[in-house]
Each structure stands twice: as structure tokens, then as C-alpha cells.
Amino acid sequence: MGKAGRALRQVLKTYKISQNKLAVTMGVERSAVFKWFHEERDPTAETVVEIVQALRRLDSEAAESFVDLYLGESSSDDER
């Protein structure tokens, strides 16, 4: 399992956002967030977008951190 779960776990811990709070904000079952958090299941690409949107509503810095961790360095930071 993957990168999304690791990124999500780090962000939720760092920004002190509970799995339940994220689940409520997203309108999903807490068990879904639990499975992502513990890397039992990877979220779909559409769900990753929903995670980012929910994190933005909770803490914009958390959302940016998740995107950075999930995608790695942004393309704007790459030297060309």
C-alpha cells in the first residue's frame, strides 16, 4: 500500500486532526479513513482530491503538506 496513507498519517498527526474529524468533513465513514491511515487500502485518485478539499476546510497548511508529501516536490520547484 502506498504513499497516500503515509502522507495522510503524517499530516493528521502533525496538524492534530483526528481521523473522525476528517471523515465527518469528507462525509465518509471513519472506517474508510482508518483504512487509508493504516495503509490497509489506498484511496482512489478522486478520493485523494476529496481528502485535499477536506483538509483545506480544516487547515490549509495541512492540505498543502499532504499534497507535498503525496506528490513529492512540486514541479514549480524543479529546475528546468
Image (cartoon, helix red, strand yellow):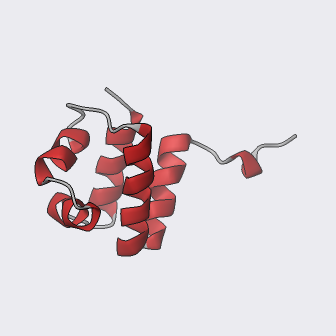
Give the image location of residue 72, x and y in percent.
57, 42
Asked whether 68 or 41 is in front, the reply is 41
Asked whether 67 or 43 is in front, the reply is 43
Q: In the displayed image of the protein, which residue is found farthest to the top?
A: 1
Residue drawn at 38 percent across, 64 percent down: 55
With respect to residue 67, does 56 lie above or below?
Answer: below
Asked whether 41 or 26 is in front, the reply is 26
Give the image location of residue 50, x and y in percent.
39, 55
With respect to residue 36, does 28 lie above or below?
Answer: below
Query: Residue 71 lies in what quarter of the image?
Result: top right
Query: Residue 5 lies in what quarter of the image?
Result: top left
Classify residue 63 as left or right of residue 34.
right
With respect to residue 13, does 3 lie above or below?
Answer: above
Residue drawn at 24 percent across, 32 percent down: 41
Residue drawn at 33 percent across, 61 percent down: 14
Number of labels in the image equals 0
Query: Residue 26 lies in what quarter of the image?
Result: bottom left
Classify residue 23 as left or right of residue 45.
left
Give the image location of residue 27, x and y in percent.
23, 61
Classify residue 1 as left or right of residue 63.
left
With respect to residue 7, does 51 lie above or below?
Answer: below
Q: Quarter of the image containing the C terminus?
A: top right
Residue drawn at 36 percent across, 30 percent down: 2
Give the image location of residue 19, x and y in percent.
19, 58
Q: Quarter of the image containing the N terminus?
A: top left
